[in-house]
Amino acid sequence: MAQTNKQGTKTRVVDRDAHWIEWLTGAVSAALVAGMIGWIGYEAATGSEGQPELSTRIVHQEKTGAGYRVTFLIENAGKRTASAVVVQGEIKDGDRVVETSEVTFDYVPANSSASGALLFRSDPEAGRPEIRPAGYSDP
Amino acid sequence: MRSKNGNQDGRDSSRPGNFVVGLGRGIGGALLFALPMQMTMEMWELGSTIDRTRLFLLLVLAIPLLVGIAHRIGFEKTFGWRDDIRDSMIAYGIGILTSAILLSLFSLLTPDMPASEILGKIALQAVPASIGAMLGRSQLGRGDADDSDDPDADGDGAPDDRGYGSELFLMAVGALFLSLNMAPTEEMILISYKMTSLHAVAMILLSIGLMHGFVYAVSFKGGHEISADTPGWHALIRFTLPGYIIALAISLYALWTFGRLDGTGLTPTIMAMIVLAFPGAIGAAAARLIL
C-alpha cells in the first residue's frame, strides 16, 4: 500500500487488488450511507414540513424544602423542531388562579421529548395543576 | 523523547534537554489543539453538567486512543507498547496540566467551587488537550526528522505501518479531533434544526466529495494516489465511504457524550449527526494527509 517516490516522501497508492476485508468494509459503508440517504428521502417524501405538535404530561409531584415541585415531560409529536418553548403551569382553586409558574425550553426537537420541572409555593394537590405549552418560535 | 534507551538514527534523545524539548512540543500541541475548546462556554458548563458515566467513558476511551496514536505516528515503530503507553501517559499528563493552568488563568476554577465541578472541568478539557499534546510531540517535531525516521527506510524490510486498519484509525483520530471541538456548541444542533431533508442530502454528498477530493484529487503533500489500472471508484468504496461512516459514528458519539441527543427522536438525531460529521469528514481526510 505504500511506496517511496524519488523525493523520498511517502505516497500511498491504492492498488487494484485489495484484501476482501476492505471490500466488505466498503460495501457495508456504502449500504449505510445509502440507507441514511434513503431514510432522509423517505422523510422528505412523507412531508417534513409540518408544525410542532407539543403536549405535556405530569410525571411526578413532590414537596421540596421551599414548596412543591411538579416534574413534567414535554413531547413534540410534530415533524418540526420548536425552539424557545414556554411552558406555563397554573394551580387553580375552582376558577380562581392561585399561582402561576413558567419555564422555557431551548429546544424541543421533532419527534422528541424533554423534561423539566415547575416550582410552586402552594400545594398542587390541593388545587389542580395545569401545565401547558404556551408558545414557541421556529429555530 | 520517544526513547531514552537508545536510538539508532543518531538523534540522541537520551539527553534530558531533548526530553524537555519533547515536553515543550507536547504543551505547544495541547495549546494549539485545545485552546478553542478551553475558551468555549459550553465546555465550561459541561464540566459540571456532563453525565458522569459518559465523562468516565470518555476518559477511559482516551487511553487506548492515545496509545494507538503513539503507536501509529510516534517517531519510530521499532519500540514496543511499553514506550507507547509511557508516551501516552505523558501526553495525558500534559493535557491535564495545561487544562488546569489555562482554566485557572481564565478564572474558571476558583477555590469555592465544589471539587467535582473543578475535576469535571479539567477532566473534560484534558482529553482533547492530551490528543493535541500527542500530535504536537510527533508533528511539531517533524522539521528535524530526517529520512531515517521513515519507517520504510529503517531497513527492517517490514511493510509500511500504514495498513488498512491504520488508515481507518487515523481517519477516526482526525474526525474525533474536529468533532470534539464542535460538538459541545449549540450551533451544531441549531443548524440541524434549520436544515431541511434536501440540505441534509446535499451535506452528505458534499462531505463525501470533499473527503475524496482532499485525499485523491487535490494533490497535497503526502498525498495518496490511485494506481493507473485502478478505477477511481475503488478508492471511494474502500477508503472514502468507510471514512465517512467513521466520521458519522464519531459525530454520534461526541453528541451523545455531550448530552446533545437526550430525548431526541431518530430523524433529528440523524440530522445532527450529519451536521457534525461534516467537519468530522474534513478532519478525517486531513488526518490521512497530515499524520
Image (tube, coloured by chain):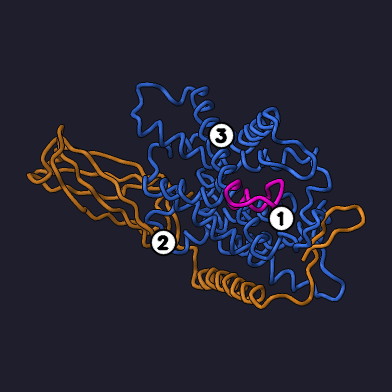
Chain colours: A orange, B blue
Residue type indicated by callout 3: Ile
Q: Quadrant of residue A12?
A: bottom right
Q: What element carries label 1?
A: helix
Q: Residue B25 carries which label?
A: none
Identify the residue position indicated by label 3 in the image.
Answer: B94
Marks 3/2: CA–CA distance: 39 Å
x 49%, y 29%: residue: B100
Q: Quick one: label 1 or label 2, which is nearer the N terminus?
A: 2
State whether residue B136 appears in this view.
Answer: no
Identify the residue position indicated by label 2 in the image.
Answer: B265
The lab-note entry on whether marks 1 and 2 share a chain reads yes
Q: Residues within 10 Å of mark 3 (few under 14, many from 20)?
A: many
Residue type indicated by callout 1: Arg
Where is residue B9 shown, x and y percent of the image? 79, 44
Q: How crowded is mark 2: few (under 14 residues within 10 Å), some or many (20 or more)?
A: some
B218 vs A88, left or right, is right
x 71%, y 55%: residue: B288
Q: Give the range drawn in magenta.
A: B68-84
Where is residue B106 shown, x and y percent of the image? 51, 24
Q: Are marks 3 and 2 in contact (CB under 8 Å)?
A: no
The mark closer to the camera, 3 or 1, is 3
Q: Mark 3 lies on which chain?
A: B
Q: Mark 2 lies on which chain?
A: B
